[in-house]
Each structure stands twice: as structure tokens, then as C-alpha cells.
């Protein structure tokens, strides 16, 4: 099963990289740029998860998790902005900037997660199960962040 997950991640990385290359060679529009940013964010997230799968220590796994969070918060934001633009939903001009700052703040909290318990209340590493992995307990900002993600999904579903 461990090898299957690694192969799946590598295949995902190859497909996302090919898609990103395809998008780079297309006519430039705001939607095209958002889709490209989405592909890059997904690619970073996939690479980070592959690193996490291959980590042999808690420190390596935590670094991989942090790397994946360079893309993970951007995924849903760019998807939301793409859908709103595609469906021609008018948003206040300040909203994308505020949402971007929120997601950058989430990245900052994850990058410093060992110094506080706001995003993860504890981070442990285990070698039991299908493959070695981090065991995370979630803090209050993690829960708020995921409520926000549900808000994005609902907003995109309504449109």
C-alpha cells in the first residue's frame, strides 16, 4: 500500500506538471492565470505530501508538511476566485486581498507551528500503520480555517 501511495503521488505530480506546462503556453487571461496558480499550488501540495510519505523522522515529516502548506491554502482560494470569475460573480475589490492575507496568515502559522498551539495543538510522529506519518491534533485556528473552507465550497456550489 505504501508503494501504491508513492506511485500515485508521483503520477499526480507528473500530470500536474504537464497541465501547468500546457497552461503556460496558452493565451493569457485572468482565468488562465488563476488556473495556472491552482495547478502550481496543487503541484507544491503533491510534492510536499510525497516528501511526507518518504520522511524518516518527525523533523523531516514536519518540514514536508510545511512545504505542502506553501501550496495547500492557495488551492481553495484560487479555485474560489476562478469559479467566481468564470461565473461572472462580482465581488468587492478588497475581498481577494483580504482572503489572500488570511491564507498567507495560515501559512505563517503552519511554518511556526512548533512554537505555538494555534494551528496544531500537538505534532507527533509514528511508524505504526501503513506508513510512517505525523499524528496531528488540531488547534482553534485549524478549526476556523476549515470552517472557512466549507464556506468556500458552499459559495462555489451556490453559484
Image: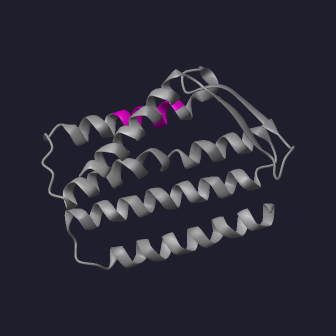
Place of residue 42 in the rendered image (x, y in percent of width and height, measured from the top left): 48, 58
**Horizontal arrangement in the rendering, residue 50 relative to residue 97 (left or right):** right
Residue 125 occupies which quadrant of the picture?
Answer: top right
- Residue 103 magenta-highlighted: yes
In the picture, the quarter occupied by the N terminus is: bottom right
The answer to whether 51 is drawn above or below residue 13 in the figure is: above
**Horizontal arrangement in the rendering, residue 80 relative to residue 5 (left or right):** left
Q: Which residue is at the far front?
A: 158
Q: How is the image coloured?
A: one colour
Place of residue 108 in the rendered image (x, y in percent of width and height, measured from the top left): 48, 32
| Bounds of the magenta segment | 102-109
Task: Name the main secondary structure of what is drawn in magenta.
Answer: helix
**Depth check, front residue: 107 or 134:** 134
Residue at the spot 65% in from the left edge and 43% down from the top edge: 63
The answer to whether 26 is drawn above or below residue 111 in the figure is: below
**Horizontal arrangement in the rendering, residue 127 relative to residue 135 (left or right):** right
Residue at the spot 76% in from the left edge and 55% down from the top edge: 54
**Horizontal arrangement in the rendering, residue 117 relative to residue 27 (left or right):** right
Residue at the spot 27% in from the left edge and 51% down from the top edge: 81
**Depth check, front residue: 44 or 91:** 91
Place of residue 7 in the rendered image (x, y in percent of width and height, measured from the top left): 71, 70
Amino acid at each position: 500500500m505504501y508503494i501504491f501511495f508513492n506511485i500515485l503521488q508521483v503520477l499526480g505530480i507528473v500530470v500536474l506538471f504537464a497541465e501547468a506546462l500546457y497552461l503556460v503556453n496558452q493565451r493569457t487571461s485572468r482565468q488562465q492565470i488563476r488556473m495556472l496558480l491552482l495547478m502550481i499550488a496543487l503541484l507544491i501540495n503533491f510534492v510536499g505530501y510525497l516528501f511526507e510519505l518518504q520522511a524518516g523522522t518527525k523533523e523531516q515529516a514536519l518540514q514536508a508538511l510545511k512545504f505542502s502548506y506553501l501550496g495547500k491554502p492557495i488551492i481553495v482560494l484560487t479555485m474560489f476566485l476562478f469559479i467566481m470569475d468564470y461565473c461572472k460573480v462580482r465581488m468587492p475589490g478588497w475581498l481577494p486581498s483580504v482572503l489572500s492575507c488570511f491564507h498567507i496568515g495560515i501559512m505563517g502559522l503552519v511554518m511556526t507551528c512548533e512554537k505555538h498551539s494555534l494551528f496544531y495543538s500537538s505534532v507527533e510522529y509514528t511508524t505504526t500503520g501503513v506508513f510512517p506519518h505525523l499524528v496531528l491534533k488540531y488547534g482553534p485556528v485549524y478549526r476556523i480555517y476549515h470552517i472557512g473552507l466549507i464556506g468556500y465550497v458552499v459559495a462555489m456550489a451556490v453559484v
